[in-house]
Image: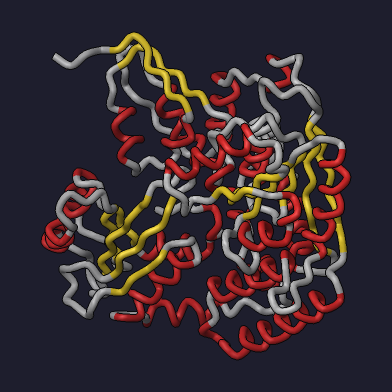
Amino acid sequence: VRRIWDLVVLDEAQKIKNRASDISRQVKHLRRLRSWAMTGTPLENQVDDLASILEFVDHTDDGTRRTYAPSNALLQRHKELQLRRRKADVLGELPPKQIITLRIPLLPRQRDAYERAEREGIVQLRAQGASIRIEHILELITRLKQLCNLDPVSGESSKLGDIHERLHMLTDEGHRALLFSQYTDENFGVGAAVRYLAAFNPLSYTGSLSSSARDAVIQRFKGDVSHRALILSLRAGGVGLNLQEASYVFHIDRWWNPAVERQAEDRTHRLGQIYPVTVFKYTCLDTIEERIEQILSEKQQLFDDIVDDVSLNIATRLTRNDLFGMFDLDVPEAATASSRSQRTGLELEERCAAILEVRGWDVRRTSRTRDGEIDLMATRVDEVGLEQTICLQCNDRARPVGVEMIRELLGALPIGSNARPVVAAPFGITADATTLASQRNVVIWDDAVLRRLENQDPVTHRDE
């Protein structure tokens, strides 16, 4: 007889926001009388995240689940069930947190490098003609955002120069600081900041470090005040750490989702902090950063009332017109749809590889094989330092995929691997294949999913 639990409590309940995930299915099948879900970010990317969490919380007395879709009914039910407590409500002794947005110009040679990259990038985008895709726009946005951090040729960085001056004053007064960047490399991200700010004996913390190495970095920062700055990658260092030793936070570059930024800066603004916390956020004037900030701030107004002041990742609401409009480009809608419908074979592999690569996956293309085997292997390190793997099969046949293809992919998975199997099948899969895929946790990318992934913001790391 299966156990019936009196109460099931989920902490970090945003982890079940994807209905198709294994953990989401497992917890929702637990027989229980009552359900609680605790999370600081019930709405990370879209309203459907909230729907999935409510489906765990809201059920009849006999355990029968209710289903929800994004709607006014969902939002009304959420208001009835939510018990919201802010830190200010329960931690009255917590010092205040001040947010300061700094809008600064690029330095002269940095400006030259930026403008040259933008001019050349727009020329290349226009040259794409009807074949231009969202990935091309996002690649240019990323390149320009990186140059806003630092020009690797001249070494100029208005942001890091400003941070350097502020750290001199702050550390002279005995304060210490956390710095966050979404990039980790030596040219634009954590590595570049460590080099530029060497005078402050900084430590670095990224997902590329082993678990033991990350623990050692944290202990060194906590125990040795000569390390006056800790420079972290946003995804690896933005959650799960207690760093009350610092009272200043610098966001070198801006993440698309404000909730992720808040989680990061709250590594220091938490129980045990005795000083007021000051957070600096940088935007470079007359750059892509300023354009992005304007668009996102306008769209944020549409969603501020959904879950009190909890932010959506508004970047997922950017339309094709928004993205193309950043560079005064027209959206080649008809031509794009036509080119999609004609893509087959290796073109489908390239399409899937582009989707993964712009999301930070390291993609390896296997030797050319038949459809039943693995076409792409993708790996990346997540925010807690664990390696994730995707084994992807691309099926370009102009008909739904059957159970045989699903079985062949499962049979080709490495023995003992925790790799996530994915089938890219623009024409969908049969009903029997759908059942098998659900049972064996095979993710299906049909044409609708592929299009959605191509239009979503890549930095949210939401992989269907």
Residue 294 location (% of width, % of height): 78, 57
What residue lies at 22% left-to-right and 65% top-to-bottom? 400
Q: Which of 321 and 209 is in front in this view?
A: 209
Relative side of 388 to 412, left or right = right
Residue 361 location (% of width, % of height): 43, 62
Displayed quadrant of residue 184: bottom right
The quadrant of the image that shows the N terminus is: top left
Relative side of 255 to 19, left or right = right
Q: Do we see residue 302 in this rendering?
A: no
What residue lies at 30% left-to-right and 14% top-to-bottom? 62
Q: Which of 191 and 174 is in front in this view?
A: 174
Relative side of 434 to 113, left or right = left
Residue 105 location (% of width, % of height): 87, 66
Snapshot colouring: secondary structure
Q: How many marks?
A: 0
Q: Which of 387 and 208 is in front in this view?
A: 208
Residue 214 location (% of width, % of height): 49, 43
Q: Do we see residue 353 in this rendering?
A: yes
On screen, 34 above or below 420? above
On screen, 353 above or below 300? below
Outermost residue toward the top in this view: 6
What residue lies at 13% left-to-right and 62% top-to-bottom? 408
Q: Which of 306 and 366 is in front in this view?
A: 366
Outermost residue toward the bottom in this view: 127
On screen, 193 above or below 62? below
What residue lies at 75% left-to-right and 20% top-to-bottom? 94
